[in-house]
Amino acid sequence: MSLYIVPVPIGNPADITRRAVQVLESVDFLVAEDTRRSARLLTHLGIAKPVMSYFSPREKAKAGAILKRLQRESAALISDSGTPVISDPGFLLVREAISRGIPVVPLPGPTAFVPALCVSGLPADRFLFLGFPPRRRNELERNLRTLAAQPFTLVFYESPRRILDLLAALLRVFGDRPFALARELSKKHESVVRGNLATHTQDLEGEPMLGEMVLVVGGYADGQAQSGEVTVTNREEILRLLEERFNLDRTAVRDAWMRKSPS
């Protein structure tokens, strides 16, 4: 039969498409990242369907039973919000379905990074979507250094708990860049903060961080510091952030920096 990739709203229930509803009504069963959240969606739509769970830690273990059913039934893959497979479970299932000759049918629909990019005010003709960045600081900064010279607009997903750390890491590695932070897209408290890493990051530190976030960052432009280089202006900003966030003595940090870095 067929596996349908069905996007669901990222916040506003009215954003689901008629075609998505038609597919959810017509398939034999659903494959969902979180069966509790999918149950709320189905109740809202007035649809009753059996649901099989399919989440990241057990994608391989769950795929076999789903693929067996797909030999004789059709299914819709949905995530908690947005488009499945995009920074959500589904890649392994789609790949295995393709390898077995099972048709995979994608539906267009909601996804968070597209509207965030559209309202960022940054170039959208060429961009890199990077999903969720590494959590550990060393790994994160190594990852960012590989991106520092890319001329494309960069798009990240991040959680409220880690967004300030990501912004600080971007400032350390990239130097100053324009950015836009989209929060709670399509929901009641939707907002977009635009500015520069060096001058606006600290403005966010006192604000409540709620909901999923999309961070859009300008690409490398001629005249900017290359990866690993820090301008005097950016150095002073980083020293200030270190002093304020970690209660460090700026003179001591400056002395240590100058011993390790060329002037």
Image (spheres, helix red, strand yellow):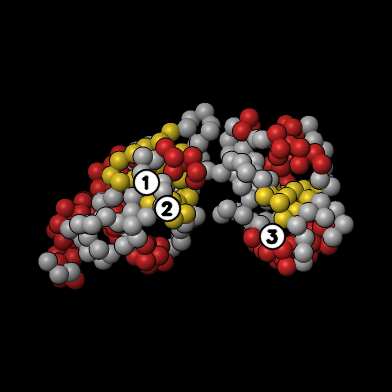
Above or below for 136 versus 39? below
Q: Amino acid at mark 3?
A: Val
Mark 3 residue crowding within 10 angstroms, few (<14) / some (14–19) / many (20+):
many
Residue at 53% across, 32% down: 187
- Is label 1 in contact with label 2 (beta carbons under 8 Å)? yes
Residue 53 visible from this viewpoint: no
Q: Amino acid at mark 1?
A: Pro
Farthest residue in the left direction? 263
**Residue 155 image offset from top left, x and y in percent:** 43, 51
Single out the mark in the foreground, 1 or 3.
1
Mark 1 residue crowding within 10 angstroms, few (<14) / some (14–19) / many (20+):
some
Q: CA distance from mark 1 to mark 3?
A: 31 Å
Quadrant into which the N terminus falls: bottom right
Query: Disc 1 marks which residue?
Result: 123
- N-term-proximal mark, 1 vs 3: 3
Count of all numbered marks drawn on residues in the image: 3
Q: CA distance from mark 3 to mark 2?
A: 25 Å
**Residue 221 image offset from top left, x and y in percent:** 27, 55
Residue 122's quadrant in the figure? top left
Query: Disc 2 marks which residue?
Result: 127
Residue at 52% across, 43% down: 112
Query: Disc 3 marks which residue?
Result: 94
Closest to the observer: 141 or 102? 102
**Residue 255 image offset from top left, x and y in percent:** 14, 65
**Residue 13 image offset from top left, x and y in percent:** 64, 32
Residue 228's quadrant in the figure? bottom left
